[in-house]
Amino acid sequence: MYLVNCRFGLHGPIEVLSREAVQMFVQGVDECQSLRRHPWGEDKYLDHCLQRLGVRRVLEFQLLSETACGQEPVNCASSNVAFHPFKGIQSYFDCWGQAMYHGNWPGDALSTHE
């Protein structure tokens, strides 16, 4: 299985695949040869290839906050695990700071703030 993180399909800022999905991709990549002619990025190619190979898609739109997925503006204080795009240094660290301040962390080992 793999998680589809955007209402428009698998989106590259975070891609979550099971070990079995990766194994099916590696073993069946030749079956996706015809997809390579499309001018897609790797995320859309992977989504279409995994579908062709019969890998189960699981819709999980809460992983990613992304302008290309229709979220304007990106909410860095949300419970999402990835935020995109932040091309400038200051905007990246502003978002990171909001996420660190407002985020819910699964334990002290992952948290750098108290």
Image (cartoon, rainbow, N blue to C red):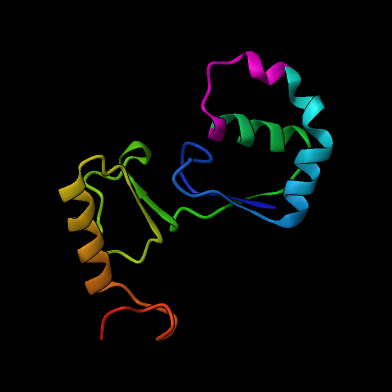
* The residue positioned farthest toward the right in the image shown: 27
**Quick check: 3 left or right of 94?**
right
* For residue 104, above or below residue 16: below
Residue 101 on the magenta span: no
Residue 18, horizontal then vertical, whole percent = 69, 56
Q: Position of residue 7 (x, y in %)?
A: 46, 42
Range of residues picked out in magenta = 34-43
Q: Quadrant of the C terminus?
A: bottom left
The residue at the point 44 percent across, 45 percent down is: 13
Residue ranking furthest to the top = 37
* Residue ID at (25%, 59%): 76
Seen at 38% across and 40% down, the residue is 69
Front-most of residues 109 and 50: 109
Residue 54 appears in the picture as rendered: no
Q: Is residue 70 above or below residue 76?
A: above
Query: Position of 112 compared to 106: left or right?
Result: left
Question: Residue 35's image quarter?
Answer: top right
User: Residue 56 placed where, x, y %?
Assistant: 72, 48
| 103 and 7: which is toward the camera | 103
| Magenta highlight on residue 36 | yes
Residue in the foreground of this view, choosing between 73 and 114: 114
The percent position of residue 54, horizontal first and vertical second, equals: 78, 40
Q: Magenta residues: mostly which secondary structure?
A: helix
Q: Is residue 45 above or below residue 74?
A: above
Is residue 9 at all visible to an observer of this figure?
yes
